Image (cartoon, rainbow, N blue to C red):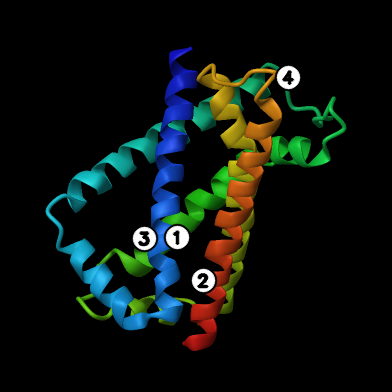
Amino acid sequence: MVRRVLLAGSGLVLMAFLVAHLIGVAIAPVAPLQFERYASALHQSWWLPLLEGLLLAAASVHASLSLNKALNNWKAGNHALLISRRGDPLGSWSARLQPIGGLTLLLFIAVHLKQLRLPRPAPGFELVHLSASLQSPLTLVLYGLACLALSLHIAQGGESAQRSLGLLTPQNAEAIRQSARAAGLLLGLGFAGSASWLALLG
């Protein structure tokens, strides 16, 4: 029970970060100067190391518990193709692809951090580095796969998190399911659209 709550809670923390991150990134294509000011102010904030530490902890907990869950399911023989009892192929596909999607996101995070955080660009050059990193076709493919994985991950994980926290009921199940899918779609398309626009601008 504790593991399920930690898995759900860490996932929701990461989802909240993604919403905030998308809002910041979406500024870049339409208002480059404002984006650079925003990025510079953010990187000089005293609380940023605390936030990054929290995100690192949440990501570590979420990844380790997800991997442990996938391995336990496999060892228990729960690796047959999932068939939705609700006649919901999207739900079954999302659940089936969670392990692969999670590994795709981990690869993307590693590449993303290497490109834009190790080292961190100097103030005023965040957008230059971001646009330059998107000129590689291989990077664009990875970004596209990561956006697809993110959409499916949130579509399935958002609903699963509410179930793990005991918030899912027969009365609100459909609303939560549709909200999770809408959030996954918006975040996936939002990041994909921003990356594509920046690649064209570069």
Q: Does the rendering let one see residue 139?
A: no
Instruction: Look at mark 1 in the image and give the residue it sits on.
Output: 22
Near mark 4 (Cα within 10 A), the count class, few <14, some 14-19 or many ≥20, is: few
Q: Are marks 4 and 1 in contact (CB under 8 Å)?
A: no
| Residue at the disc numbered 3 | 113
Look at the picture and state if 136 lies above or below 40: below
Q: Which residue is mark 2?
A: 194
- Rendering quarter of residue 31: bottom left
Lower position in the chain sequence, tag 2 or tag 4: 4
Of circles 3 and 1, the one toward us is 1
- Which residue, given by chain and number where applicable, does mark 4 sit on? 77
| Secondary structure of the residue carrying numbered label 2 | helix
Q: Is residue 107 left or right of residue 42?
A: right
Task: Give the foreground label among 3 and 2.
Answer: 2
Name the kind of residue labelled 4 in the image.
Gly
Mark found first going from the N terminus, 3 or 1 = 1
Q: Is residue 11 left or right of residue 153?
A: left
Mark toward the start of the polypeptide (2 vs 1): 1
Q: Tell me what residue is drawn at x 60 percent, y 28 percent.
A: 160
Q: Position of residue 170 (x, y in %)?
A: 70, 18
Q: Residue at x 39, y 48 (%)?
A: 17
Q: Does label 3 or label 2 sit earlier along the sequence?
A: 3
Amino acid under label 1?
Leu
Q: Can you name the residue that lies furthest to the front here?
A: 171
